[in-house]
Structures are given as C-alpha cells and as structure tokens.
Image: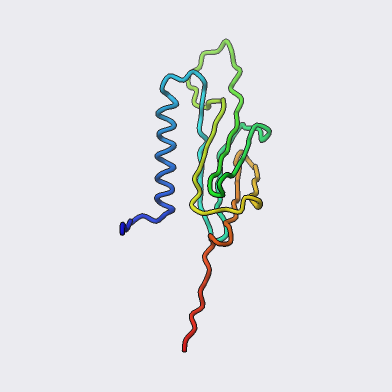
Amino acid sequence: MIVSRYSPSVLFSQMNRLSDEMDRVFAGSGETSATWHPRVDAWSTEEAIHVDFELPGVSMENVEITVTGENQLSVRGERAASEETDVTWHRRERLGGEFHRVLELPELVDTKSVQARFRDGVLSITLPKREEARPHRIEVQVD
C-alpha cells in the first residue's frame, strides 16, 4: 500500500497547476490564435465543491458550463480581443479569444443541482456532492 503525505485536495491542486502550466507552454508553440486561461480557485466543503473563475470582460452569453461523468467540470467561452488599430502597444497582457478549462473534481456531484452565479467579473459555480460522496457519521453501539 502506498501512503502519501499529501491529502487528495493538495494532489488535486498540484495536478491542476501542472495542467495549467502545460497548457501555457504548448499555447505558445507557434499557434497564431490568441488563447488565454482564466485563473481558477477550487475548494470543497462537506456538502459541495466550489469553483471560482476570474472572467473580467467576458459576457456570460459567450460562456458554456457543462458537467460530465458526474466529476468533470468544463467551462468554455470567449473574451473579445481589443479592436485598437493604428496604435503602438507598449504592453499587452490581457489576451482575448477563446478559452476552455476542464477540471477533474475530487468527488461525484449532483449534476442536476449545480448552480452558477456571475458577479464582479467572477463566475462562481457550486457543485453539490452526491449523497453517497458526503461523509456520514456512524454511531457506535456500546454493549
């Protein structure tokens, strides 16, 4: 049996960070279309998994959220690129274009009860855990 000193949530975070870095490396490998990856925070409580996406300048009409396999969250969308012409750019870090993030969730979720809210440029998604994925307290009978 292999014992890890890392909790599942730490491993989940590390795997997502590695995935993000790999996406960034390969996105710069000669592709001509602008791609960007919104920043993501993900955490869980006993009842649900919560995920926040930073999406400044993105219209929710251009965002699609799906949950597949009861433990995979996909968020796809597009932010309009700057239309400035006849200018000299000194710095350009706010890319436009399409984005697509897929997160493997650490628990099974109730796909019919997922809620999403957009406020102040942050998309907050709450994914309730399926009942069998939630911790249950076991009463011990004493004889």
Dividing the picture into quadrants, the one containing residue 1 is bottom left
- State how the image is colored: rainbow
Viewer-proximal residue, 66 or 7? 66
3 to the left or right of 101 = left
Residue at screen point 55% across, 62% down: 132
Residue lying furthest top: 86
Residue at screen point 61% across, 40% down: 65
User: Residue 18: x, y in percent?
Assistant: 39, 39
7 to the left or right of 1 = right
User: Residue 116: x, y in percent?
Assistant: 64, 46
Tally the numbered discs. 0
User: Residue 48: x, y in percent?
Assistant: 57, 56
Residue lying furthest bottom: 143
Viewer-proximal residue, 48 or 107? 107
Viewer-proximal residue, 108 or 125? 108
Residue at screen point 65% across, 52% down: 113
Residue at screen point 55% across, 13% down: 87
2 to the left or right of 80 = left
User: Residue 89: x, y in percent?
Assistant: 50, 17
Is 43 rendered above or below residue 121?
below
